[in-house]
Image: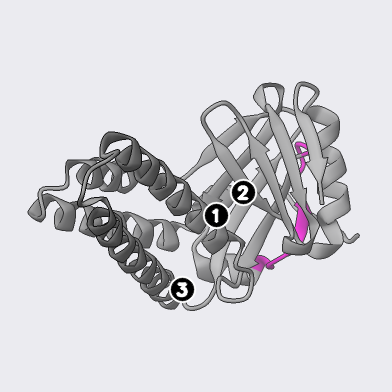
Amino acid sequence: MNIKNIESLDFGSLTSEEAGELGLNVVFLEEDGTYDWIYCLKMLQNLSLLKFVMKIIAVIYAVITITMLVLTKGADDILWLLGILGLVFVAVIGIVLFSFWLVDKMYKGSYMLIYEMNDAGLTFSQTTDQAQITRTIAAASAAVNAAGGNVGGVIAGTGLAIRPNAYHADFSKVRSVKGRRKENLIWVNTFLQYLMVYVPDEAYDFVWTYITERCVNAKISSR
């Protein structure tokens, strides 16, 4: 694996253009021992992000369906209710697929993911311009949900719109690490946070070993 040595640099303030000029899918070693890399995720080729969203939706609708079956047990209109729920589920899937395609276009086919890793933990952020796009989408979503009276959607959209452009996981607090080698993905999970760590192919083994050796309290699994 080729690691480029560079001086200290604030990776969290890079634009997509600056990231491309610096180097994508390359691991950098800073003076303080921090490893950094910028992963260019092709969202329509690596579908792991879409699969994750679909799983969340499927779980939510499974819970809703089971709850409805319990609450309406013996009711004459249960089949009609399940039919409506099924149509809503199909509509939601369609919206998600369209949104996924639209976001990919807005990111110009390249989702820039920035990772900074040292002995203490790992930080994920976006390039500054893509982070602004994310906030704009979230704010628009909150406005649409407000117009439709969806309080939950307003809260979720507003939360994303004002969130910081960084997520950090302390290795000492990580509960599980899951490797998905074919997807160039390592899940680093704490109590309330699931961090998707995408790693360049040639650096995967190095990053996997680095993380798992330091997550001493975590359950480790890979496939």
Magenta-highlighted residues: 22-33
Q: Residues within 10 Å of mark 2 (few under 14, many from 20)?
A: some
11 vs 91, nearest the viewer: 91
Q: Amino acid at mark 3?
A: Asp
Q: Indicate the colouring scheme.
A: one colour
Q: Is residue 8 visible?
A: no
Say which mark, if any, is on residue 196.
2
The disc labelled 2 sits on which kind of residue?
Met
Secondary structure, mark 3, is helix
What SS does tag 1 mark?
helix
Mark seen at residue 117: none
At label 3, counting other C-alpha atoms closer than 10 Å, the crowd grade (few under 14, some 14-19, many 20 or more) is some
Q: Is residue 141 above or below residue 34?
A: below
Position of residue 171 measured from the top left corner of the image (x, y, whole percent): 71, 28
The earlier-in-sequence mark between 1 and 2 is 1
Residue bearing mark 1: 52
Residue at the (59%, 51%) spot, across then down: 11
Q: Quadrant of residue 154?
A: top left
Q: Are marks 1 and 2 in contact (CB under 8 Å)?
A: yes
Nearer to the camera, 172 or 123: 172
Q: Of label 2 and label 3, which has the lower sequence position?
A: 3
In the rendered structure, find residue 104 and report the number of the disc placed on it.
Answer: 3
Label 1, label 2: how many angstroms apart (C-alpha)? 10 Å
Above-or-below relation of 10 to 15? above
Sequence-wise, the earlier of marks 1 and 3 is 1
